[in-house]
Image (cartoon, rainbow, N blue to C red):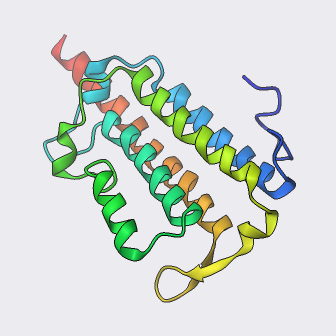
Amino acid sequence: MDDTIFLIKEKKGLKKDFGLLASMMDYARLTTIQEVESLTVEELDYRVNEDANSIGMLLAHFDAVEKIYQALTFENLSDEEVDRYADSLEPALSLGKAAEVIKGKEAGEYLGQLSETRDRTYNKFRDLPENWLYEESDWWYGKKGNNFFKWFHVFEDEINHRGQIRMIKKIFTKEKEMVE
């Protein structure tokens, strides 16, 4: 574990505010990794019921969310181009019934993809001026949002779904105990 994991500060060769954001993103990711790195494929694919997400589905969702936010904030894409790109990230982006095809992967596959996507994010952060974080655009509910908020939402979504991961793990363990 990185000695600076509990410090929100400049890091990774990033400008100050990007470093603060990356500090929070790194902690959120570390706790996700700790939850899933030793899970079996059976545990990653387990679903509480046919309408529920699996842990693997949620990990694929984290990756898809980060990729769509890369497109939304780094690229100057038209709404049509964003929609096409979002379609390419399905079913992981929206989850639901269609995402049940996400299965059969080892934890390392999911974590490797998450790492590659995060590396692309940080590489782009290194190239951007700090004022980019504060650029505003139309966002949700007819309100403005800035890029800082958008990237906060990326790891906030992960933290929210990590709660689901913990619940799924508990139910899986309890179900296994009842069978044995």
At 20% across and 19% down in the image, what residue appears? 178
* Position of residue 82 measured from the top left corner of the image (x, y, whole percent): 40, 67
Image coords of residue 14 (percent x, y)? 81, 47
- Residue closest to the eye, 46 or 155: 155
Point 41% across, 49% down: residue: 64
Q: Is residue 17 left or right of residue 101?
A: right
Residue at image coords 40%, 24%: 109
Q: Position of residue 43 (x, y in %)?
A: 30, 23
Judged from this view, the residue extending furthest toward the bottom is 142
Report x, y in % for residue 136.
65, 80
- Relative to 36, is 92 above or below? below
Q: What's the residue at 47%, 69% (across, down)?
A: 77
Q: Nearer the viewer, residue 91 or 8?
A: 91
Q: Is residue 39 above or below residue 25?
A: above
Name the quarter where the C terminus is drawn: top left
Near-viewer residue (51 or 107)? 107
Q: Nearer the viewer, residue 112 or 166?
A: 112
Residue 156 as seen in the image, left or right of residue 83: right
Compared across the picture, whether 129 is left or right of 118 comes to: right
Please tell me how many numbered marks the rendered image carries: 0
Quarter in which the N terminus is drawn: top right
